């Protein structure tokens, strides 16, 4: 059995992880530990506090006891707001605290874009525009070309967690760009695990969502490969035979 650990801020769409575990349908387990969210606000100062090293390190012992072989900070906004270099420092501190390979959802997006072999992307975000722009800056630092960025002005993760298929589809459509090779939905508070394949069918291109890429990144850290068409193009690049 392979256990992959996730530090998830507060409570919003954490049920995406057991759903993804069921879709993978293998010997892979996805334990989630909830971190102290502090103030629930998509605001730069609150996000910097949410992603502080001491908040993340508080949950690593529980993940070690669960047998985790890697740990991912399952939060996009409270990683990319630190900037490219600051997000690297955040992950290094997490790896040292956990004694395990570590990453974050922001780096998961950067690596997933590379895995798909695309460069031109569109961002459809739940965040206010200024926070969404920080994500675009992070992606550009990774080498991606961001053709468009659309924020939705949602302040709290709690509100994002109430969104269903209609809201997610409307946001993805509104944030798409005709020249984009992929559309990115960067919020782990957003339920998307059940929608990825349908979103790709509607938009006619790969769609990367926060919880989807977070799990893929954890698998990458331990060099596991799975083929799960229900999780979209990112999970269909691997051989059908499960390793």
Image (cartoon, rainbow, N blue to C red):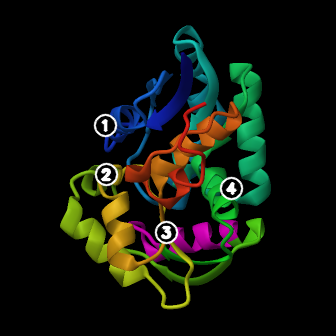
Q: CA distance from mark 1 to mark 2?
A: 8 Å
Q: Is residue 64 above or below residue 169?
A: above
Where residue 147 sits, quadrant-wise, is bottom right
| Residue 30 at x, y percent in the picture | 46, 27
Which residue is the site of mark 4? Answer: 111
**Mark before the other along the chain sequence, 1 or 4:** 1
Q: CA distance from mark 1 to mark 4?
A: 24 Å
Q: Using residue 22 as the reference point, say whether residue 49 is left or right of it.
A: right
**Mark before the other along the chain sequence, 1 or 3:** 1
Q: Residue at x 62, y 51 (%)?
A: 108
Residue 105 visible to an observer of this rendering: yes
| Residue 11 at x, y percent in the picture | 33, 37
Which residue is the site of mark 3? Answer: 206
Residue 81 visible to an observer of this rendering: no
- The question of residue 45 being in magenta is answered with no
Q: Residue at x 66, y 40 (%)?
A: 220
């Amino acid at each position: 059995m392979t256990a992959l650990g996730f530090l998830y801020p507060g409570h919003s769409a954490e049920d995406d992880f057991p759903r993804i575990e069921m879709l993978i349908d293998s010997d892979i387990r996805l334990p989630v530990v909830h971190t102290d969210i502090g103030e629930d606000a998509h605001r730069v100062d609150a996000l910097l506090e949410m992603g502080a090293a001491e908040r993340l390190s508080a949950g690593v012992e529980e993940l070690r006891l669960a047998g985790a072989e890697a740990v991912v900070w399952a939060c996009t906004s409270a990683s990319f707001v630190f900037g490219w270099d600051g997000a690297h420092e955040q992950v290094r501190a997490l790896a040292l605290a956990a004694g395990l390979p570590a990453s974050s959802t922001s780096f998961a997006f950067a690596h997933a874009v590379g895995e798909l072999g695309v460069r031109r992307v569109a961002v459809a975000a739940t965040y206010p525009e200024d926070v969404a722009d920080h994500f675009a800056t992070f992606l550009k630092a990774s080498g991606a070309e961001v053709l468009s960025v659309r924020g939705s002005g949602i302040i709290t993760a709690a509100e994002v967690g109430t969104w269903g298929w209609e809201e997610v589809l409307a946001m993805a459509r509104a944030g798409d760009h005709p020249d984009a090779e992929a559309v990115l939905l960067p919020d782990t508070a957003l339920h998307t695990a059940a929608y990825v394949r349908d979103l790709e069918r509607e938009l006619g291109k790969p769609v990367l969502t926060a919880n989807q890429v977070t799990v893929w990144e954890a698998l990458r850290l331990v060099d596991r490969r799975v083929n799960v068409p229900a999780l979209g193009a990112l999970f269909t690049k691997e051989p059908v035979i499960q390793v």
